[in-house]
Image (cartoon, rainbow, N blue to C red):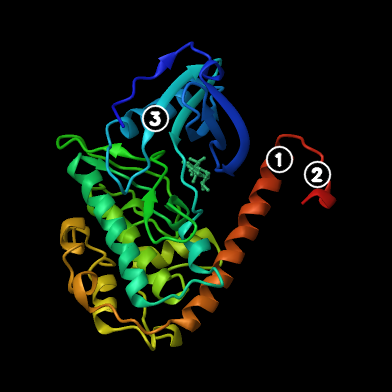
């Protein structure tokens, strides 16, 4: 993969065949696609940009992706800006979302498996940070498995990523409250450590099937995050080692400056050697519930969005 330059006013359909949809986010729709000259299968993320500001945001995402080359990160193959739509041609990732894979019948969930995933996530983040970029949207939906059976993952979606500029105070107001760091919610200055909080939340959920700060509403969740209080006092954690808890503890620290960096995280004892092989069956049951609930929320949000656009909803189709 090379650095990509966005092609202006060139129809991507000249070079790529757009095939069925494979995924949908709040901004873009992702389709399977094939490069006509080589037959190579890829993914096309298409974002409609009605407003100039929207377009600038998407172009920024592409600009950031185009300079990140690492096996743990989704790779950009080509990009087009054509008739109010931006097309990002991406490497195709076939294994689906990490949490969907983890709840598969034939997947044996152990601490070791969690540590293998967490190591790769931290390696990806370490590289992103080394390129002076903060991801700012680390959450399970943005971690995909490379294949349906293997354990390799890739981080996707750089829609919220920002370049860190030392003399510029960076504050943001977006992300998912459940995974957002206290400094995001308090509208304080953010830094590389902001991603590491989210990594800590992902690891907590993976180990237990429970979400450490989630409340009944977004406001309740945000209050819990700003308090920064959480507990390992649930039966899901009965079979979880102290080293695993220590890994999470070193990330879920309110004061970002005291959090483990990505570089430290990949060297943590739990990641390097001590993760246990015991099966976490209660965690898996709880994770299933967690994933199903998320699917519901996503479906309801899609319906709300469609209704807002004036669509008549035929419930039989859902
Ligand atoms: P969000 O609402 O999370 O910001 P988005 O609109 O920016 O989403 P993505 O998260 O990039 O869109 O993609 C939406 C979905 O499409 C993903 O959750 C994933 O399931 C699927 N997807 C994205 N990229 C790929 C890819 N390269 N290969 C296969 N599937 C993909």
The residue tagged 1 is 306
Real-space Cα distance between discs 3 and 1? Answer: 31 Å
Q: Earlier in the sequence, mark 3 or mark 2?
A: 3
In front: 52, or 75? Answer: 75
- Depth check: give the residue in front, 177 or 262: 262
Residue drawn at the location 49% of the way across and 57% of the way down: 148
Residue in view at x 29 percent, y 28 percent: 2
How many angstroms separate mark 3 from mark 2 (CA)? 36 Å
Q: Position of residue 136 (x, y in %)?
A: 34, 47
Instruction: Please tell me how crowded label 2 is: few (under 14), some (14-19), or many (20+) other residues with Cα within 10 Å.
Output: few
* Tag 2 secondary structure: loop
Left-right relation of 280 to 17: left
Residue matched to label 3: 77
- How many neighbours does mark 1 have within 10 angstroms: few (below 14), some (14-19), or many (20 or more)? few
Foreground disc of the pair 3, 1: 3
Which mark is drawn over residue 313? 2
Q: Could you tell me which secondary element the residue under label 1 belongs to?
A: helix
Q: Circles 2 and 1: CB distance less than 8 Å?
A: yes
Vertical side of 272 occupied by 158: above or below? above
Q: Is residue 193 above or below residue 4?
A: below
């Amino acid at each position: 993969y090379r650095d990509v330059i966005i092609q202006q006013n060139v129809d991507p359909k000249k070079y790529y065949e757009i095939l069925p949809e494979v995924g949908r986010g709040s901004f873009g729709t992702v389709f399977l696609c094939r490069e006509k000259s080589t037959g190579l299968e890829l993914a096309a993320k298409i974002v409609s940009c009605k407003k100039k500001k929207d377009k600038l945001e998407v172009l920024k995402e592409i600009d950031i992706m185009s300079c990140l080359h690492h096996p743990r990160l989704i790779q950009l193959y080509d990009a087009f800006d054509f008739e109010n739509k931006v097309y990002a041609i991406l490497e195709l990732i076939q294994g689906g979302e990490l949490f969907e894979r983890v709840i598969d019948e034939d997947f044996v969930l152990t601490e070791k498996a969690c540590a293998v995933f967490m190591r790769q996530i931290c390696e990806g983040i370490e590289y992103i940070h080394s390129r002076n970029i903060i991801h700012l949207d680390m959450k399970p939906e943005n971690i995909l498995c490379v294949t349906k059976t293997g354990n390799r993952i890739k981080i996707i979606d750089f829609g919220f990523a920002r370049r860190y500029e030392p003399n510029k105070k960076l504050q943001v107001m977006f992300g998912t409250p459940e995974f957002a760091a206290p400094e995001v919610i308090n509208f304080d200055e953010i830094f590389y450590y902001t991603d590491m909080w989210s990594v800590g939340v992902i690891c907590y959920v993976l180990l237990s099937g429970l979400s450490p700060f989630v409340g009944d509403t977004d406001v309740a969740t945000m209050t819990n995050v700003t308090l920064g209080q959480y507990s390992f006092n649930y039966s899901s954690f009965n079979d979880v080692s102290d080293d695993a808890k220590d890994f999470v503890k070193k990330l879920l620290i309110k004061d970002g400056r005291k959090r483990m960096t990505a570089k430290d995280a990949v060297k943590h004892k739990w990641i390097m050697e001590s993760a246990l092989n015991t099966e976490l069956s209660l965690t898996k049951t709880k994770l299933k519930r967690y994933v199903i609930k998320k699917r519901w929320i996503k479906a309801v949000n899609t319906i709300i969005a469609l209704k807002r656009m004036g669509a008549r909803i035929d419930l039989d189709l859902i």
